Amino acid sequence: MPQQKKVLRARGFTLIELLVALVIVGLLAAVIFANVGNARERAVAAQMLADFEKIHNALILMAQANHIDRWWSDNDADPPTIPGNTTNPQTNPSIQWLIDNGGTTGLGRYLSKEPSIGIGNLYQYDRDGNDEFDPDDDGCDTDPADNGVIIQRTQMENYQNIFDIIDRAVDGGNEPTPELCGKIRFFNTTGGYVLVYMISKDGRF
C-alpha cells in the first residue's frame, strides 16, 4: 500500500498574539526614537557650545590685534575702533555682519570656521551701554540678556533640552535659577527663544 503522507497545517497567529507583538514593536520603536532624538540634541548642543567658544576666542584675538582694551558697547555714540563697527555701528551686530564688514583685520580673519549650527546671522554680539551683569556678585541677575557682554544664539529649536545640556556642561546645571544664573542663560522674546553665552560681567576683558 502506498505510504500515506500526513499533511500538517501551519498554525496561524491569534488576534491576541498579533496585538501583543504590535505593542512590543511599538514600545521598542519609541525607545529607539527617543534615544536617537536625545543623541541628536546632544550633538546639536555640543556643536553650539563649540560655536560660542570659537566666536569668543575670535573676538578676543581681533581685539588684541587691533589694540582694543575693552569690549565695545553696541549702542555707544563713539565706539572704540572695531573693524566693521566704526562708521556704521550696529545694534546687536550679527557675527555674520562682523565677518562681512570687518575687512582684512576683522572678525573673519580670526574665526577659522563659520558657526556651524545655522549661519552666523543667528549669533549676535551684545553689550548694552555700561550695564553690569550680576551687580551683587551672586552669579545671577534679574535680567537674562541686557547686562554685561554676551554672545546670543537666536531662533532656538528644542530650546529646553539643548539649554539643559549646555547649562549642565558649563555651569553644572545646579544654579538656583538656571535661566538667570551662570555663564549660560536663556530667555523668550517675541521672535523665539534665545540662548545667552556670557563673556564678560562688564566692559573689561
Image (tube, rainbow, N blue to C red):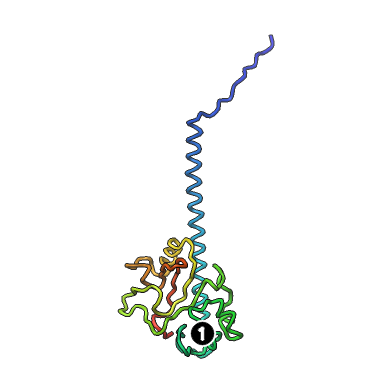
- The three-letter code of the residue at mark 1 reads Pro
Residue at image x 41%, y 74%? 145
The reply to whether residue 147 is in sight is: yes
| Above or below 21: residue 197 | below
Q: Position of residue 186 (x, y in %)?
A: 41, 69
The residue at the far front in this view is 190
Q: Quadrant of the N terminus?
A: top right
Residue 80 locus on image (x, y percent):
49, 89
| Mark 1, secondary structure of its residue | loop
Mark 1 surroundings: few (<14), some (14-19) or many (≥20) residues within 10 A = some
Residue drawn where x is 41% and y is 68% of the image: 187
At x 47%, y 83%, the residue is: 74
Can the viewer see residue 140?
Answer: no
Which of the image's four quarters has the C terminus? bottom left
Q: Quadrant of residue 146?
A: bottom left
Is residue 193 shown above or below 135? above
| Direction top: furthest residue | 1
Disc 1 designates what residue? 89
Q: Where is residue 75 in the image (x, y as percent from the top left)?
A: 45, 84
The image shows residue 72, relative to residue 167, as above or below, that is: below
Residue 26 in picture, x, y percent from top left: 49, 43
**Disc count in the image?**
1
Residue at the image point whose x is 36% and y is 74% from the top: 143
Foreground residue among 99 and 205: 99
